[in-house]
Image (cartoon, grey):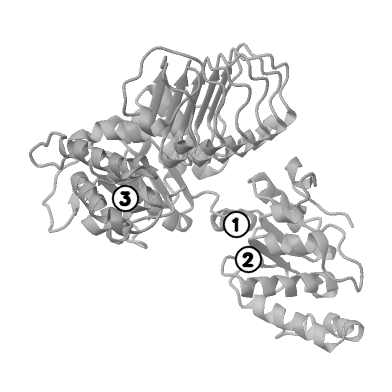
Amino acid sequence: MKRKWNSFPDLASGDDGELPGAEFEVFLNFGELDTCLGFTDCLYHAMDGAGVHVFRDEEGIQKGEEIGGELLHAIDNSKVYVTIFSRDYASSAECLRELAHIMKRYRGSSGKVILPIFYNVGAHDVELQTGVYDEALKEHEDRFGSDVVQRWKEALIEVARIEGWDLKDKGEGAVIKQIVDEVLTRLKKRQRNLPDHLIGIHDHFKDMTCLLQKGSPDVRFVVIHGMGGIGKTTLAEAVFNQISHQFCGHSFLSNVRESSQDDKIRELQWRLLSDILKFRPPRIYEANDGVNMLKKRFRHKKVLIVLDDIDNRNQLMTLAGKHDWFGPGSRIIITTRDIRSLSINKGRPRDSDCIQHGEFYTYEMKEMPLHHALQLFSEHAFRRATPPTDYANLATKIVKTTGGFPLALKVIGSSLCYKSEAVWEDTLEKLIKMPQREGTSNLNSQSRELQNLQERLVFKDRESLVEIDLSIANQEHLQCLEIRRRNRLGSLLEEASTEIGPCGVPQSLPDSMGNLRFLTTLKMVNLELFELPETIGKLKSLLQLELGGMMKISGLPHFIGDLKMLRKMVLYRAPIEKVPDSIGGLESLIELNLENTDIIELPTCIGN
């Protein structure tokens, strides 16, 4: 029996003994006679082109054959079922067998999703109200028995009552686009990567929901402001994940403050167009040209845009300047450390953290209350919601020194994980000795230093670093890691807070690097690495990868293709001879620099 896989070559290999079905995300259930070469084929390739792993059965099981093997595993392990009902659908016993098993899996798992499509039939036909399927079902009953067919009928009736798409009098292209968008949303492929434990975010989320006013036709700008590391980005990401499906297009631009230069602004403008219009826009040569393109393309679209970490008004004016750039119902969410940098007209304060300043609504993020702060600290220090009894007093004292500052809670909690009580007491003593400033808590006065520790680690010419320890996994919120010319690297959590001076050369990286799921920038220069760990493919938030002067590395791991968010890859002065075919999976890649490498040609899939 021949099967149809999508264009990801690793899925078809059985080297590890795992059935290919386990790799699929979407299972296509359809009647071959009247949809296979038309609508179904277009839908399949649209999902495949969007990076979705799709399974469809090209030839089908033989008459009388039971579901098993690859087909059974494909159904069992897919998250989304796309069922395409046509007039000849019920003529296929295979379709009905698949549907019955799909409905069984759907009923037994809360994580499964069914997306029914009615092609030249209506939901009432599939619900067996009209007799369209009666003749085919009668023939099946004669062949397979009434008990089997009754299960098929029940599956048809049940699936017909699930909301789906009716193609009657609708353009197939537009419907396919809607379906692909829904599949991507259900698979969370366009969602932001958030921590497992969103502690204390619920009240903030409710406030933001009120400010955003779902259903209101106005174009609304909402500014989340507060000190660095207070949780602004996390709140924006949580809101983005929850409401993005309500918009015709959406985009989340991270770390905008790092893009003040004209070329960086143009890159962000290009990305906005790409994310929301879902095609590759032309190159933008001037920021003013980008402004005109944004206004022209978005003025009739309901869009959701997040501009994360803005620090000057020019960034705002070149990316989301005015309300009339966007269609009715659009929402623009902005995060900033200093609201004064946006020059927002001040309005009359209300009795809330939510204030309207002219055309902008603002929301101030404040420190966490003690009970939430202790829980967040405990998750990082103990990997549990509350501290053990023998550490409860110490933990509470340390938490109080942070003043409910989330970044400090995460950094300090991670650094104390699995450490002795003596280390805890020494840490508490150091925290208490931190200078206080009027109107701020102990650690708030050190917010910039903590922000740098949490978000960016740069090691240059350091001698006493011995190896990159597995404890790097504790720094899961690290956003930038830069390593230049040293031997091996030791426990980052300890070395980050000590003075270290002149140099050696690192030779290996631990697999635990894959746990740095918030890492956006990875730069490694003049190191003696022989290879990169396969877990580099787990860095789902990585936007920029730079490898320079790596004279012993000859290639890149296949898993490099899993970096779906990667926008810039720089490989220079390295004896790399070729890049893996998986590079075609880098769907967000804008810049590829291969200066002074041994690469002669690129794989054809680079065009993807």
Q: Is residue 160 left or right of residue 519?
A: right
How far apart are the alpha carbons under marks 3 and 1?
36 Å
- Residue 129 at what x, y percent from top left? 70, 86
SS for callout 1: helix
Residue displayed at 69% across by 17% down: 599
Residue 337 vertical placement versus 603 (above, below): below
Of marks 3 and 1, which one's residue comes earlier in the chain?
1
Q: Amino acid at mark 2?
A: Leu
- Residue 260 at what x, y percent from top left? 34, 26
Residue 93's disc number: none
Pointer 3 local density, CA inside 10 Å: few below 14, some 14–19, many at least 20: many
Please report contact status of discs 3 and 1: CB closer than 8 Å, yes or no: no
Which residue bears the numbered disc 1? 183
How far apart are the alpha carbons under marks 1 and 2?
9 Å
Residue displayed at 41% across by 17% down: 462
Residue displayed at 11% across by 51% down: 348
Q: Residue furthest bottom?
A: 146
Residue 377's disc number: 3
Please report contact status of discs 1 and 2: CB closer than 8 Å, yes or no: yes
